[in-house]
Amino acid sequence: MAKRKIKTYEQLIKENKAAIMNNQKLMNVIYDRIDRKHQKLLRHNSHT
């Protein structure tokens, strides 16, 4: 069985940027996910 190359979230966004930018709802979903990820990092870093 061939191994599939796993792409990061950022790579997928870069590849699909044009389609994403035309879709406001999708952009909101992505920004929301990035915000949550960032908030988690901020909380984690503030405890150390």
Image (cartoon, grey):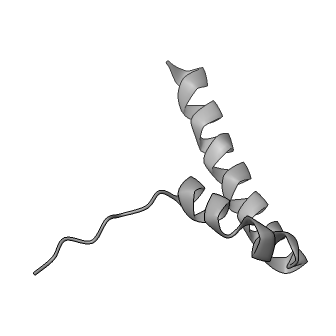
Q: Position of residue 13 (x, y in %)?
A: 65, 62
Q: Which of the pair 17/42 is nearer the observer?
A: 17
Compared to residue 33, the image places residue 26 above or below, namely below
Q: In this view, does 29 lie above or below 11?
A: below
The residue that appears at 73% across and 50% down in the rendered structure is 35
**Residue lying at the far top of the rendered structure:** 48
Q: What residue is shown at x 56% (from left), y 25% (from top)?
A: 45
In-image side of 28 versus 9 (left or right) = right
Q: Where is residue 24 in the image (x, y as percent from the top left)?
A: 89, 75
Q: Residue at x 15, y 76 (%)?
A: 2
Residue at image location 85% in from the left, 78% down from the top: 25
Q: In this view, does 4 lie above or below 7?
A: below
The x and y percentages for residue 19 are: 77, 77
| Location of residue 5 by image quarter | bottom left
Closer to the camera in the image, 34 or 18: 18
Residue 7: quarter of image:
bottom left
